[in-house]
Image: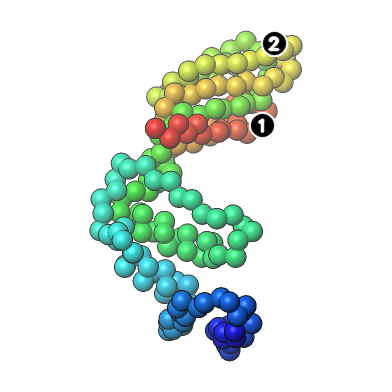
Amino acid sequence: MNVRLPWRESEIELDLPDDWRVIAEGRPKSFAARTSVEEEFARAMAEPIGAAPLAGRDLRGQRIVLVVDDLTRPTPAHLFFPYLLRELERAGAVLRIEDVVSQDYVRLDVIDRPGTLARIATLFGQARIGISSVIQPEGHEGRSVPLILMIHDASNAAMTQALGRINRLSVVKSPAVMIRVEDFR
């Protein structure tokens, strides 16, 4: 038995075994071509399937996880992601980076001499940032050693300000490395 199926701009013919029975034949619906990914995404955001539009929701204080496919997939995630973030911003779900509050790991490369830790702790204190724990391997006075700190919850704005001041200290040999600690609670 021969069956013709749509294929790209034309059709293909399949030769099926004679004892097979075709129950139904479906043809894809025709859709008008979209002029751009942006146009299609705007339409999808305004008319989502099975849910209210994001822009009409109050998502302030809600935690949202965005999952997109990996780079090996041929989808235009890099094109629609900015539009999705804008919609989430309108719904109040996106904080400005300055307002993000988290714990942080901070790694500094400092000169091992008396008062170094005190100077750094003072600058954190002036920014109203608490230090949860400190690790400083034993070094030799006058030489460079790593100083690792776990910081209590602090805003990104306060951390940026404090680390800017700390990085200018003469005992700090390279810019601080800060790693945000996310707990997803």
Residue at left offset 26%, top offset 54%: 57
Residue 142 falls left or right of residue 83: right
Q: Which residue is more in the foreground, 74 or 167?
A: 74
Quarter of the picture containing the N terminus is: bottom right
Residue at left offset 42%, top offset 41%: 98
Within the image, what quadrant is residue 90 found in? bottom left
Name which residue type carries label 1. Ser
Q: Position of residue 33 (x, y in %)?
A: 46, 82
Residue 165 drawn above or below residue 24: above
Q: Secondary structure at mark 2?
A: loop
Q: Position of residue 165 (x, y in %)?
A: 52, 31
Residue 42 drawn above or below residue 111: below
Of all residues shown, which one is farthest toward the front? 19
Q: Which residue is more in the foreground, 133 or 16?
A: 16
Q: How is the image coloured?
A: rainbow
Q: Is residue 181 visible?
A: yes
Q: Which residue is more in the foreground, 24 or 181?
A: 24
Q: Secondary structure at mark 1?
A: strand
Residue at left offset 54%, top offset 61%: 78
Name which residue type carries label 2. Glu
Q: Earlier in the sequence, mark 2 or mark 1?
A: 2
Q: Position of residue 22 (x, y in %)?
A: 50, 78
Name the residue that disc number 2 marks: 138
Residue at left offset 48%, top offset 50%: 67
Q: Position of residue 152 (x, y in %)?
A: 44, 23
Name the residue that disc number 1 marks: 174
